[in-house]
Amino acid sequence: MSYSDALVVLKQHSLPDLVQDELEQLILDGKLAPGEPLREIAIASLLGVSRGPVREAFRALEEKGLLRIAKNCGVSVRALSAGEADQIYEVRIVLEAMIGRKVAETITETGLAELKAILKAMVTAAKDDNVHPYTYLNLAFHDALARLSGNVALHESYRRLVAQLTLFRHKAYLHDRTSMALSLREHQEIVSAIEAQKPNRASDLLRSHARDSRKRLHAALGRSARP
């Protein structure tokens, strides 16, 4: 949502929620970088709102793990460390396996069509070597999977974890273009297992996919740290 679009719908939505959505999108798009300080007055001016809704949005995004609010230091976009990401991945691996099993057991034609549509767009993005669209579609694919599990608590827990990982997960694709091709192949195998309604296979594939994603991230961070 653009700033102008946000202003158009101000009257239809809670201001704090709207500001939160806008800031979250800027963070996930990489337009607000990890460690970048955020000023209430600047954000309020940018979005054309008062400082109150901005303050509430800051608190909500801190709870989601996307911002840090430190006494006497102000607010900044959370800079996730490799160690923190590793801990998040440990939980994500377990959730992915659960999601894969549940979706394969209960998938509908509509749900499968949704996954295939996202996968088709991912193929195009990978073929064109478009990192940003691919990263966005990757998130959409996994969010759809979590939602299709039918477990609201599982979906909400998964979304929180993935939002935090997005703080620097795109580095895996930026530093190694082959990562996109590997990731795409894994997604294709996952959809095939779900379509065949093989819960064990889907669970194993998603568990392995999460582990491979963690390895790719570690490799990318290692390359980016070299002089």
Image (cartoon, rainbow, N blue to C red):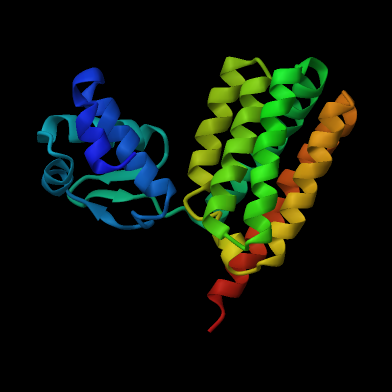
Which quarter of the figure has residue 59? top left
Q: How many numbered dots are placed on residues in this image?
A: 0
Position of 177 with respect to 45 (left or right) is: right
Position of 140 with respect to 103 (left or right) is: left
Q: Which is nearer the eye, 83 or 65?
A: 65
Residue depicted at x 24% and y 21%: 14
Position of 22 with respect to 131 (left or right) is: left
Residue depicted at x 30% and y 33%: 20
Q: Which is nearer the eye, 47 or 127?
A: 127
Q: Which is nearer the eye, 132 or 36?
A: 132
Q: Could you say where residue 50 lies in the image, as x and y percent from the top left?
A: 10, 33
Which quarter of the figure has residue 113? top right
Q: Residue furthest bottom?
A: 227
Res 212 visible: no
Residue depicted at x 20% and y 33%: 7
Res 21 visible: yes
Q: Could you say where residue 47 lies in the image, as x and y percent from the top left?
A: 18, 40
Q: Which is nearer the eye, 74 or 138?
A: 138
Q: Could you say where residue 143 lies in the image, as x and y percent from the top left?
A: 59, 32
- Reply above or below: 174 against 123: below
Residue depicted at x 38% and y 56%: 34
- Reply above or below: 214 against 128: above
Q: Quadrant of the N terminus?
A: top left
Q: Could you say where residue 183 lies in the image, as x and y percent from the top left?
A: 72, 52
